[in-house]
Image (tube, grey):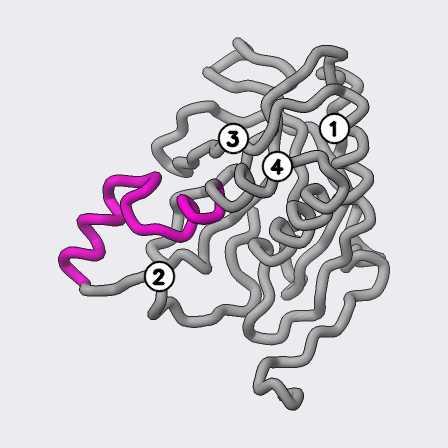
Amino acid sequence: MNHSGKPPVVVAENMGRPRDTIAPVDIAYIYPDPPENLDVMLQIYHTHENFRGRHWAIVWQTAGDLEHGRAAFRTLQTSIEPGKPHYTNWGPLTKTFKVVDPETPFALLPLANLSLSDRQRLEDIARETPVYVPNGNWNCQDWVMMVLDRAVELGLIPAASRDNALWKARTRGAIFAEDAIIAMHSGSSCDSVASYGVLGAR
């Protein structure tokens, strides 16, 4: 612990990229980021009752109407590789996933409508944002907030949009109706959420 009583924050070497792990394939060569303005969104997965256990990412759709209800999204996030108990920042990646998936439901919260050049600036921010060594508190949500804060500083994302999305992400029932039902039965709230270490990675 440091003097503030919080766990120390230590930057992971090489963005947490394991030397014995092959980087994920970026399929932007198949689904390139188009030249028009696109909506950039905060993605919140609803795969954990605890708010701090939910995976966050920043995404925008680059192609739709793919097979099996899938779409292509440019994705800014951290991940946890199999057998590696820490976060990794592989940089911006394009991937496909189901837009509606009952097994891994998620919500998309609007952040900004950005030009291609501004999206590329946002990618640069994500590419340069470090991950930290697990300390029992820091997780993927903190990384996303670091990216968003920097994007606000540079004028890419309005502060009001960031704050509104974060409020919804942390407020029971604001996105997922099931949260309000869980809160009614458990009496739990955002304020009582326990801190976690390596959580919420996909």
Tell me residue 70's x, y (percent): 52, 19
Which residue bears the numbered disc 1?
Answer: 119
Tell me residue 62's x, y (percent): 65, 18
* Left or right placement of residue 106 versus residue 65 in this view: left
Q: Identify the residue at image location x=24%, y=44%.
A: 178
Q: Is mark 3 on a helix, strand or loop?
A: strand
Query: Between 142 and 199, which is closer to the camera in this rendering?
Result: 142
* Left or right placement of residue 195 versus residue 130 in this view: left
Tell me residue 143's x, y (percent): 65, 54
Q: What element carries label 1?
A: helix
The amino acid type, in three-letter code, at marker 2 is Cys
Q: Identify the residue at image location x=19%, y=64%.
A: 187
Q: Quadrant of residue 29?
A: top right
Are discs 4 and 2 less than 8 Å apart at CB? no
Which residue bears the numbered disc 4?
Answer: 158
Q: How many labels does the image show?
A: 4
The amino acid type, in three-letter code, at marker 4 is Pro
Q: Residues within 10 Å of mark 4 (few under 14, many from 20)?
A: some
Are discs 1 and 4 less than 8 Å apart at CB? no
Which residue bears the numbered disc 2?
Answer: 190
Q: Distance between the residues labelled 1 and 3?
A: 14 Å
Tell me residue 59's x, y (percent): 61, 32
Sequence-first tag of 1 and 3: 3
Prevailing secondary structure class for the magenta stretch in the rendered image: helix
Sequence-first tag of 1 and 2: 1
